Image: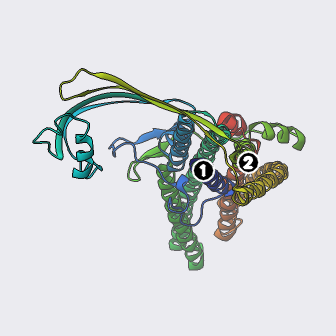
Amino acid sequence: MKEARQFARLWVAGLVCTAAVGSAVMACAQSGYPSQNPSSTTNPFYGSVTAHAISDEPLKLSLDDAIRRGFENNLGLREAQSGEKLFQGEKNQALQEFLPTINLSGGTGVFQHNLAAQGFGPGVLKQFGSLFPNGLPTGVSLITKDDLTQGQLSLSQTLFSGVVIAGWKAAGAAAKSAYFQKMSARGEVVQQVATAYLRAIADASEVDNATALTKSDEVALQHAHDAHVAGTVANLEELRARVQLQSQQQALIAAQNAEEKDLILLKREIGIDPGQKIVLIDPAPYTDLAEQTPAEVRAIAYKNRQDYQNLQNQVIEVRALHSAYKAQRLPSLSFSGYYGVDKVNGSPSHGVFNAVGTLNVPIFREASIRGEVDASAAQLASINAQLDDLRGKIDQQVRSALLDADAAKKLVDVAKSNVDLATQALNDETDRVSAGVDDNLPLVTAQSSLASAQTNYVRSLYQYNLAKLALARAAGVIELQYRAYLGR
């Protein structure tokens, strides 16, 4: 029964590993944004295996291409895939407990034996001498030699063991849990890569806005300088225009720096060398999200959420482990045997065999068994409590995601209206300055208002797309339906 206890404990350790990996994946999934210094040290989904060397030609990258590369190279997903292979290997080891173990062996050699060491000393040999008419032949040595050639086929198999049966069920549940962890990791890759891609698009839009406003400020400064030289405006107007230009140049530098850093993060997530130049070819998607009720999304989530399915399989696994511990009270039946051929010192070969059936009946080990059963029962109660909590957590996440998506959509509408109003205000002020009605100060103010409105629109659109991705993740369909949710 020692092997039975080791077998059951093996699956307890597997369960702990399964739960730890699943918790790490879900912890990453709940982090909406990367930290200030995202690193694969703290979150493997920020890292990857670099797949290609740097090319002089810029790499054109669509969102679908980026996600495909993430599936191939992302470090977090590769770790989840390795975990699945680990539990598949454990499952195969459990399968072997049901199958016969057959070995074929053979050998030949020269052996020397000390009869005295084996109990045939001189006194014993004298007793044997009385059996011969003339006594023992002279020259009998206590040291003998023989040539032995053997061939043997052996077989052993467990015919019945409650621990093995329960362990096999636990192994199957653990393998399924690892599969759902891998699928959850794929969803995390989609969310992380899409988030980084959309952020880089938003950065590019802000760079474009900042560049356009910088050029506009350069023209305004030139006009103010010319007017000052002509004596039509005071030096203060030129100073205001110069300060505005330098402020906008600072904003442009900051926007360009943010874009480059976010592109590096994207490349790190999908296995592209950080030094490789890439060009994002997809524009920022925008479409209204179809209305869904919390009950509709929750039903989809219960059906598709990998973490929910994973925890359900962990319940099955712990139940099987609980049964394995209880099964240690049951008898086990096994068979072992061999058939072989021996040939000694040139004599004719002769067949040898052995066939043994073993019935192992545990008599008393109740304290240890009860302790293991009680521990597994507590673990089962804990997993069931986690499953109940996850149902409520899914409901919470679904409702929160729907609220976030609705609020983000309203912010997009307001931001777009602000851009239209700021554009109209800038056009009107430009006409007034051109007509000589106003000086440059109101024009600079109108330009700043437009820049702020455009930046807010880009950010609100980015937040809306993130909210839709979060809703798809909460529903458990992000891998298959991220295009539909983004409106691509």
The circle on residue 2 is none
Residue in the picture at 80% in, 55% down? 381
- Image quadrant holding the C terminus, namely top right
Left or right of 231 on screen, residue 110: left
Q: Position of residue 198 (x, y in %)?
A: 61, 48
Height in image: 145 above or below 384?
above
Tell which of 459 and 2 is nearer to you. 2
Residue under pointer 1: 14
Q: CA distance from mark 1 to mark 2?
A: 19 Å
Residue 443 lies, with reference to residue 161, above or below; the image says below
Name the one closer to the observer, 431 or 199: 199
Asked whether residue 149 appears in the rendered view, the answer is: yes
Secondary structure beneath dot 1 equals helix
In the image, 339 versus 65, the foreground residue is 339
Residue furthest to the left: 139
Task: Identify the residue at horizontal 72%, vertical 54% (top origin).
Answer: 460
Residue at the (83%, 49%) spot, across then down: 391
Task: Please name the residue that numbered disc 2 is placed on.
Answer: 326
Q: Position of residue 264 (x, y in %)?
A: 47, 55
